[in-house]
Image: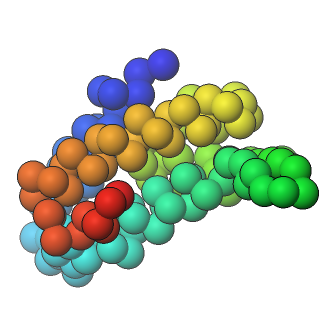
Amino acid sequence: MKTKRTHWLLLPILLSGCMAGDEPYTPVANLQELMATVVDPAADFYWDAVGWIVDSTGTEEIRPRSPEEWDLVRNAAFVVAEIEVAEARDPMAVFDVGAEMYAVCTGCHATYALETIRPGG
């Protein structure tokens, strides 16, 4: 898996689009708006796709159940540049990459957007 390296591919790809072509480009969103409206919702969807709820009644497994649900996870993975495990439809790998992705996101937020980190999170 190329998880650690691919986390940083998204931003340069997005920013390179600002300079593509001969026509002047007028941004419609700043970085904070892009994160809030595109990246963060995709990351949240990805993180919520696989997990477990353990309580007194037992364990409930959360995972995509249909090809369509897996496609939605894959689409979110494309946004955050974590494609391979979603395409493999491997719930445990999706969960593990989600944990790595969370660490990378938190590290970036700690440097550039400290106000967005939730207490205890």
Residue farthest toward the front in the current orientation of the protein: 56
Q: Nearer the viewer, residue 44 or 59?
A: 59
Residue farthest toward the top in the current orientation of the protein: 1
- Is 10 left or right of 60, judged from the image as shown? left
Q: How is this picture coloured?
A: rainbow
Q: Quadrant of the C terminus?
A: bottom left
**Residue 4 picture location, percent across and down:** 33, 28
Residue 30 higher or lower than 19, as above or below: below
Residue 85 higher or lower than 36, as above or below: above
Q: Residue at x 30, y 49 (%)?
A: 105
Residue 7: image quadrant is: top left
**Residue 54 picture location, percent across and down:** 76, 51
Q: Is residue 115 visible?
A: yes
Q: Nearer the viewer, residue 105 or 121?
A: 121
Q: Is residue 20 visible?
A: no
Q: Residue at x 33, y 73 (%)?
A: 36
Residue 69: image quadrant is: bottom right
- Is 38 left or right of 106, judged from the image as shown? right
Q: Residue at x 9, y 52 (%)?
A: 111
Residue 116 higher or lower than 110, as above or below: below
Q: Nearer the viewer, residue 107 or 72?
A: 107
Number of numbered discs present?
Answer: 0
Q: Residue at x 84, y 57 (%)?
A: 56
